Image (cartoon, helix red, strand yellow):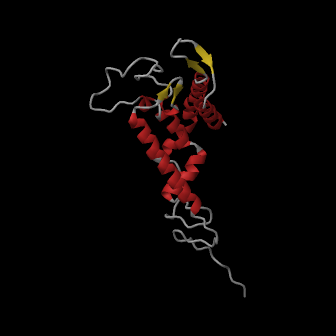
Amino acid sequence: MSSIQLFRPRAFGETSRRDIWWIQPLAVFLGFSAFIVYSTWAAFQNAHYTFGPYLSPFYSPEIFGDSHHALFGPKPGWWPGWLPFSPAFLILWAPAGFRFTCYYYRGAYYKAFWADPPNCAVGEPRKSYWGENSFPLIMQNIHRYFFYLAFAFIVILAYDAWKGMWFEDPATGATSFGIGIGTLVLIVNVLLLGS
């Protein structure tokens, strides 16, 4: 008589895989965490974000600020005194909204931060699938709208790279074309973000 093997759900982390499957989610967890810590520090620093024609992408476009790149002048009067001010606070939400809701990042940080699933063919921490149809995960569906904002930032960063090719001579005030390491960094940033 033949027998039928019934499927038994795997326990959390249980797998038949023989490779070191946990390295990729761990690397993503460490990389994302490091980036979040660095970007938060860079935004709160509110200093050293401009040099000559260069403007840090974390601060671009500088809507309000103290540098010559500011579109509307210094910190606005309506900004609450108890709240730290940084030009980065006014713009970082848009590219972050796109990156944290895009499909690739969702798959990566679901595995890395929530272990849901930990990896392919590895047991999950819960037994049912909830999907993205309840708060807060339903907010992931705004990804398509953040795309338009993120695309605008690619155009703005390309313009900043263009402005980074024009240097002012402090002695004469004359502007001349040039390419420095900062210019190359700004160009590569635009190419990588836009591809």
Q: Decide if residue 130 is in sight here.
A: no
Q: Position of residue 192 (x, y in %)?
A: 64, 38
Q: Residue furthest bottom?
A: 1
Towards the viewer: 104 or 178: 178
Q: Quadrant of residue 167?
A: top right
Q: Quadrant of residue 3?
A: bottom right
Towards the viewer: 184 or 11: 184
Residue plotted at (53% across, 26% down): 54
User: Count the marks: how many?
Assistant: 0
**Quadrant including the C terminus:** top right
In this rendering, is residue 54 above or below 73?
A: below
Q: Position of residue 45 (x, y in %)?
A: 39, 36
In this rendering, is residue 32 above or below 122?
A: above
Towards the viewer: 174 or 48: 174
In this rendering, is residue 9 above or below 48?
A: below
Q: Position of residue 185 (x, y in %)?
A: 60, 34
Q: Quadrant of residue 174?
A: top right
